[in-house]
């Protein structure tokens, strides 16, 4: 089932709406109808929600277009009931650039809110003494406060909010990125705890937000540390050069035996020394069920991800792991090793302890079964 719908393109970026977004519209509109409210009140409520999302889209465009100035593309912008998400290809690592990209979103809402405020002031809308309840009911005042709320919420200095990135960027001008992220993550977690406690007294939604912020802080710190641990390393440094492989016409039953006896879940398949693909354990089991034990090994090869070059930076290779935990490393058309998430982790662990590691070129033995 498709969960997101493409609804258009703005400035070359796909705009998508998540299905759950429509539940929000029903959730807002239905109570008014049930409680006997007029259709016009309900439509006004819905219009307010739709405008809120227009502001969110403009906010995300603020991030996306600023990133574009620094040569970073945006894959798409998706609207969710909790707000919008702009998927940038990456976040700029230069503190000044990151600051501008992160601050651009809230800046858009600040400008819209300020523009409404100024036009209300110029139009003589506010008369003293202020009648707060009537003011809060006014459509334009609601639009203005919506924008100012978006600014305040997004500038909470905690990942994954924009404020967390702004904070990291400011710290980043004084120290390296890993340290800046670590400190920003600690500050984010302190804020999450305070939010969580406040949530019990004020509003339970705050507790949910606190959980969201707590995990966001940890995830950001981890991803930055992983990337830092991989700097300067290439695929050749982390590949597994000793592994079992099978011939293309070996029966699936025997392939299964090899996998069980060696403990190697993913087996490369070769035909006359030519690499054809990798059989993953789940594909093997499925193929045995479908084709029987005597079918040849090559029938169980799944969709093969592109092979990696041994000189590719590990940081880049890490992004290739999606459905698959193991990727083939190809040099001059031949399979020379396997890169796994586990082998990367081990290499990083050694790297962080400053231990130079022999890349294994001295004893490259490949077992053939
Ligand atoms: Zn933002």
Image (tube, rainbow, N blue to C red):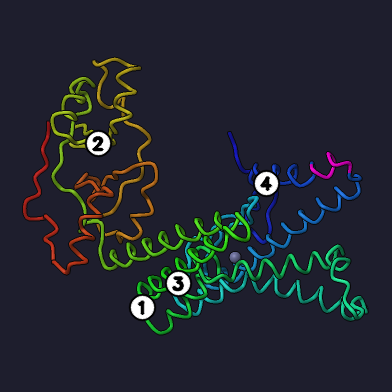
In front: label 1 or label 3: 3
Front residue (pair 315, 23): 23
Residue under label 4, please give it.
Answer: 21
- Residue 38 is drawn in which quadrant? top right
Q: If the image is split into quadrants, where does the N terminus sit?
A: top right
Q: Position of residue 176 (x, y in %)?
A: 36, 78
Please state the extent of the stretch shown in magenta in the rendering: 31-36
Front residue (pair 246, 5): 5
Element at badge 2?
loop
User: Does residue 64 show up?
Assistant: no
Q: Residues within 10 Å of mark 3 (few under 14, many from 20)?
A: some
Q: Position of residue 296 (x, y in %)?
A: 25, 21
Residue drawn at (70%, 51%) of the image? 8
- Indicate which disc residue 176 carries: 1
In front: label 4 or label 2: 4
Element at badge 4?
helix
Residue 331 versus residue 214 in the image, above or below: above
In front: label 2 or label 3: 3
Q: Earlier in the sequence, mark 1 or mark 3?
A: 1
In front: label 2 or label 1: 1
Residue drawn at (48%, 80%) of the image? 170
Q: Earlier in the sequence, mark 2 or mark 1?
A: 1
Q: Residues within 10 Å of mark 2 (few under 14, many from 20)?
A: many
């Amino acid at each position: 089932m498709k969960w997101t719908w493409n609804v258009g393109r703005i400035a070359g970026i796909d705009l998508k709406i998540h299905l759950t977004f429509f539940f929000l519209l029903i959730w807002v509109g239905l109570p008014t109808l049930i409680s006997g409210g007029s259709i016009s009140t309900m439509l006004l409520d819905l219009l307010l929600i739709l405008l809120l999302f227009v502001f969110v889209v403009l906010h995300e465009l603020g991030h996306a277009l600023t990133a574009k100035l620094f040569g970073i593309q945006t894959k798409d912008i998706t609207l969710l009931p909790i707000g919008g998400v702009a998927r940038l290809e990456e976040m700029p690592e230069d503190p000044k650039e990151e600051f501008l990209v992160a601050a651009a979103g809230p800046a858009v809402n600040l400008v819209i809110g300020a523009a409404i405020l100024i036009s209300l002031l110029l139009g003589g809308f506010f008369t003293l003494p202020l009648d707060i309840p009537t003011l809060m009911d006014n459509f334009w005042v609601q639009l203005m406060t919506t924008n100012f709320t978006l600014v305040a919420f997004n500038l909470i200095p905690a990942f994954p909010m924009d404020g967390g990135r702004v904070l990291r960027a400011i710290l980043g001008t004084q120290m390296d990125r890993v340290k800046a992220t670590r400190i920003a993550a600690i500050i984010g977690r302190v804020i999450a705890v305070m939010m969580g406690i406040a949530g019990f007294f004020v509003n339970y939604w705050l507790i949910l937000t606190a959980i969201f912020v707590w995990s966001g802080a940890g995830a950001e710190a981890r991803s930055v540390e992983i990337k830092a641990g991989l700097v300067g390393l290439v695929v050749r440094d982390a590949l597994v050069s000793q592994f079992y492989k099978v011939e293309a016409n070996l029966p699936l039953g025997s392939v299964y035996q090899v996998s069980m006896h060696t403990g190697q879940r993913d087996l490369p398949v070769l035909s006359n020394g030519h690499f054809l693909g990798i059989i993953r354990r789940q594909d093997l089991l499925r193929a045995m069920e479908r084709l029987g034990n005597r079918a040849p090994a090559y029938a169980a090869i799944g969709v093969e991800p592109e092979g990696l070059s041994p000189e590719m930076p590990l940081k880049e290779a890490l992004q290739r792991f999606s459905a698959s935990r193991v990727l083939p490393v190809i040099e001059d058309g031949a399979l020379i090793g396997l890169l796994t998430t586990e082998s990367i982790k081990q290499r990083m662990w050694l790297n962080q302890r400053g231990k130079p590691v022999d890349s294994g070129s001295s004893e490259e033995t490949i077992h053939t079964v």
